[in-house]
């Protein structure tokens, strides 16, 4: 049974019907104006934003679909409280989803075009060019045939024949490319823009190289995923994708991309190791959406919160008692952990475990008591400032071999115990009913 969350356009239509989308009717310039409106909108709410009239393109642009933990929970078939648990369960049981793909014909309304037909969104002032930031790369391991889903930015500079893309060295896609290069072959890739939400979320996951991320996508969707023939590639493509760019990555040849405003909130330097994509075909469904994402924004951090936060939570719960939940949605490379404190060094043990688990993704860890909302930074800092001696609950660590510096100051790790001592006489002041009252029953 197909769910509304299994197809981006169906889900956007449902959100529109529910009145949960900010709609921009006026024409917007894809050079900075569109991104500026996304940024401003996300500072005021977590609602998706739909641009109906983008200068220079016939495609409407949708952004911030994934900028809300409740929406990602809806895609996963749970509520926000169960998001991490559900995500971890999907990861752990994906292999049980066998015979998960169903071949369907090419949609009758498919249209062909060029890269220049797509919106060319210039996100940040010093970006080298417009970029595709939501392209899910689908590729097959040249040796095993295992599918991989991942994200890589594409620089839209030059003609319709090629683009530059940045593939991070640790990613499986880089390993696939290395295998193809060793054979002197180009690696086939499909770049999925407006991918079905289960495919998009599966691309956020970091699975072992032998694990099938399309299988995970199908598992998120409830068991199957419709796949259609590609036009120029040797493998099938998720049929509900809005726009597909079919390409090959040239072997043994590199180019430049960047600078580019990355998820950390800073510009990365010029990348001299960018790969060259030779464009074979660009196609889209009738009335297709183009999907945009402002790197470093609410949406970017929410996606990281699901992929990294859930993984950290799983590791902590297996190693330590009474870890309740984890988030990294507040800031990149920082996590907040809520515990039911059992002994005085409990928070310190959690901090140590976090830094051992994935040092390159965790530069700071704050541990709070069970009464604190970890999504509310005001509460988090209030707990630190009011629950003990500040100078005795901050721990610094030597470098643990995290990310290389580039143009960032990646040095050291910081742990903060924001929990109350078990012997503290303090009792938090509360008012009966304050958390259960529906204000709409009182305020017109």
Image (cartoon, rainbow, N blue to C red):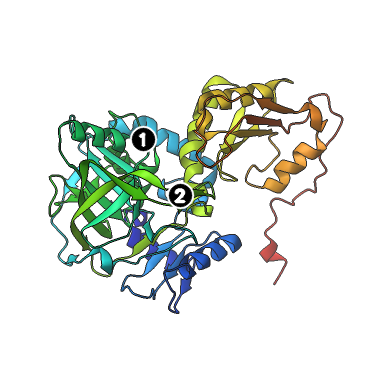
The residue at which mark 1 appears reads as 169
The residue at which mark 2 appears reads as 72
Location of residue 312 with respect to 79 vertically, above or below: above
Which mark lies nearer to you, 1 or 2? Answer: 1
Q: Nearer the viewer, residue 48 or 232?
A: 232
Res. 42 in view: yes
The percent position of residue 213, horizontal first and vertical second, equals 30, 38
Location of residue 81 with respect to 420 vertically, above or below: below
Q: CA–CA distance between discs 1 and 2?
A: 28 Å
For marks 1 and 2 on the same chain, the one whose residue lies earlier in the sequence: 2
Please tell me in which quadrant of the rendered image residue 174 appears: top left
Residue at 54% across, 59% down? 46
Q: Is residue 1 left or right of residue 76?
A: left
The residue carrying pointer 1 sits among few (fewer than 14), some (14 to 19) or many (20 or more) residues within 10 Å by Cα, namely few
Residue at 61% across, 22% down? 352
Please tell me in which quadrant of the rendered image residue 385 appears: top right
The percent position of residue 149, horizontal first and vertical second, equals 30, 42
Location of residue 316 with respect to 373 vertically, above or below: above
- Tell me the quadrant of the picture where the C terminus can be found: bottom right
The percent position of residue 269, horizontal first and vertical second, equals 46, 47
Residue at 78% across, 25% down? 422
Question: Which secondary structure lies at badge 2?
Answer: helix
Q: Is residue 113 left or right of residue 69?
A: left
The percent position of residue 268, horizontal first and vertical second, equals 47, 47
Residue at 36% across, 70% down? 60
């Amino acid at each position: 049974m197909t769910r509304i969350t299994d197809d981006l356009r169906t889900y956007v239509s449902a959100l529109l019907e529910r009145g949960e989308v900010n709609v921009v009717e006026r024409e917007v310039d894809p050079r900075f104006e569109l991104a500026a409106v996304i940024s401003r909108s996300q500072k005021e709410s977590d609602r998706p934003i739909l641009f109906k009239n983008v200068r220079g393109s016939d495609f409407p642009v949708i952004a911030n679909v994934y900028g809300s933990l409740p929406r990602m929970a809806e895609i996963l078939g749970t509520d926000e409280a169960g998001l991490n648990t559900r995500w971890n369960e999907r990861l752990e049981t994906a292999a049980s989803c066998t015979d998960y793909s169903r071949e369907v014909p090419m949609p009758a309304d498919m249209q062909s075009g060029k890269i220049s037909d797509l919106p060319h969104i210039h996100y940040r002032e010093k970006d080298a060019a417009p970029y595709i930031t939501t392209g899910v790369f689908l590729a097959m391991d040249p040796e095993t045939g295992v599918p991989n889903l991942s994200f890589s930015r594409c620089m839209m500079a030059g003609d319709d024949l090629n683009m530059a893309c940045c593939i991070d060295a640790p990613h499986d896609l880089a390993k696939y490319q290395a295998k193809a290069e060793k054979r002197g072959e180009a690696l086939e890739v499909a770049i999925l823009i407006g991918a079905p939400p289960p495919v998009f979320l599966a691309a956020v996951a970091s699975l072992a190289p032998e694990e099938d991320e399309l299988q995970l996508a199908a598992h998120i969707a409830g068991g199957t995923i419709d796949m259609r023939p590609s036009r120029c590639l040797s493998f099938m493509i998720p049929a509900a994708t809005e726009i597909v760019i079919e390409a090959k990555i040239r072997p043994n040849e590199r180019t430049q991309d960047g600078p580019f405003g990355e998820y950390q909130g800073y510009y990365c330097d010029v990348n001299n190791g960018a790969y060259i994509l030779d464009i074979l075909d660009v196609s889209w469904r009738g009335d297709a959406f183009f999907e945009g994402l402002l790197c470093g924004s609410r949406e970017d951090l929410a996606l990281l919160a699901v992929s990294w936060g859930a993984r950290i939570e799983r590791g902590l719960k297996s190693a330590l008692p009474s870890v309740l939940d984890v988030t990294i949605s507040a800031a990149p490379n920082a996590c907040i952990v809520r515990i039911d404190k059992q002994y005085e060094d409990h928070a310190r043990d959690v901090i140590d475990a976090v830094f051992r688990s994935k040092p390159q993704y965790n530069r700071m860890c704050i541990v709070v008591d069970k009464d604190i909302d970890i999504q509310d930074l005001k509460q988090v800092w209030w707990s630190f400032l009011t629950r003990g001696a500040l100078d005795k609950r901050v721990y610094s660590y030597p470098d643990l071999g995290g990310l290389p510096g580039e143009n960032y100051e990646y040095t050291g790790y910081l742990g903060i115990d924001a929990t109350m001592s078990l012997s503290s006489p303090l009792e938090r002041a509360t008012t009966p009913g304050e958390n259960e009252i529906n204000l709409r029953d009182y305020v017109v």
